[in-house]
Amino acid sequence: MSIITLTTDLGTKDHYVAIIKGEIYNQIKDINIVDISNDISKFDIQEAAFVFKNCYKNFPDGTVHIIGVNEELSNENQHLAIQTDNHFIIGPDNGIFSLIFDEILPEKIVELNIPLESDILTFAIKDVFIKAACHFIRGGTIEMIGNPLTDFQNKVTSLKAVISPNSIKGNIMHIDSYGNATTNINKELFNKIGMGRDFEILYGKETEKITKIVSKYKDVTEGERLAIFSTHGNLEISMNQGNANKLLGLEIYDIIRIEFK
């Protein structure tokens, strides 16, 4: 069965996600709709890019992805469709694709030219993105619904870890429902700069520190803070059966610094 995924900041309290799913089912009866997340912080393309980038490749070839965060059409923010790694991704040109594809450009990018059925421009997911997604599910090509872009450029600068010979400075990029705080410092970078040396992970007002990285949460006692590399390889500050976000005061975009000795 074909798959369409949703990554939005619409939340789950209101009726908006239900409208999107209903419209998809009206067009494609035999479809599997997967919520990557509808709880992205409002208009936060950095968080949306981080969440999406770390999971979309786990879906089968042919999956169609809809990203709806700050998607309202404007002269500055057009609507794009992207084909890469046998996936189709539909979303706004508001900088989010610059964050997702900050290292390798996708194979094909088009600016969508799907005609609108009304002059209401505030719900692009429903009025534009769903049409594009269903077009791909039916086997349509990307060239049929958009004009190729050959001058795709980064609109925003990704929050990347800053390195020196003896330190790495990064940021918290995502806090999950358990309160675990995931950073933009990955294991490969940690090993490259650290070279097996002792270290201190500093956070908060840098009066708090962690001096080892564990392999599982239960390597420390219940309620104890810890550092661990998450399933997608990024450094995470957590607590065993506790909420690091609330109990340690960790927030998105807080600085995390690692000093090597």
Image: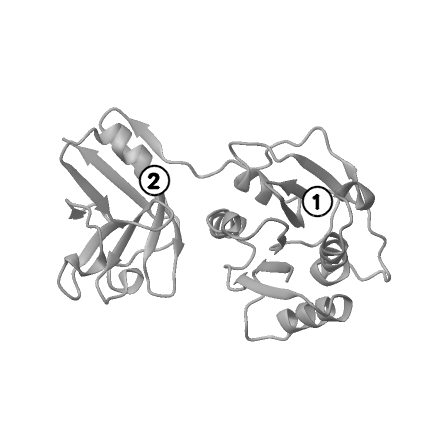
Kind of residue at badge 2: Asn
Contact between labelled residues 1 and 2, with CB atoms less than 8 Å apart: no
Residue placed under numbered mark 2 in the picture: 186
Graded by Cα atoms within 10 Å as few (under 14), some (14 to 19) or many (20 or more), the crowding at tag 2 reads: some
Q: Is residue 100 visible?
A: yes
Q: Is residue 77 visible?
A: no
Residue placed under numbered mark 1 in the picture: 80
Graded by Cα atoms within 10 Å as few (under 14), some (14 to 19) or many (20 or more), the crowding at tag 1 reads: many
Residue 80: x percent and y percent? 70, 44
Q: Quadrant of the C terminus?
A: top left
Q: Which badge, 2 or 1, is on the more N-terminal residue?
A: 1
Above or below for 237 versus 108: below
Kind of residue at badge 1: Leu
Give me the residue at 22% from left, 31% from top.
Answer: 194
Looking at the rendering, which quadrant does residue 121 occupy?
Answer: bottom right
Task: Label 2, secondary structure: give it.
Answer: strand
| 253 sits left or right of 120 in the view | left
Looking at the rendering, which quadrant does residue 28 occupy?
Answer: bottom right
Colouring style: one colour
Residue 75: x percent and y percent? 75, 43
Give me the residue at 57% from left, 38% from top.
Answer: 98
Distance in Å between CA atoms under marks 2 and 1: 29 Å
Marker disc for residue 244: none
Extreme residue in the top direction: 165
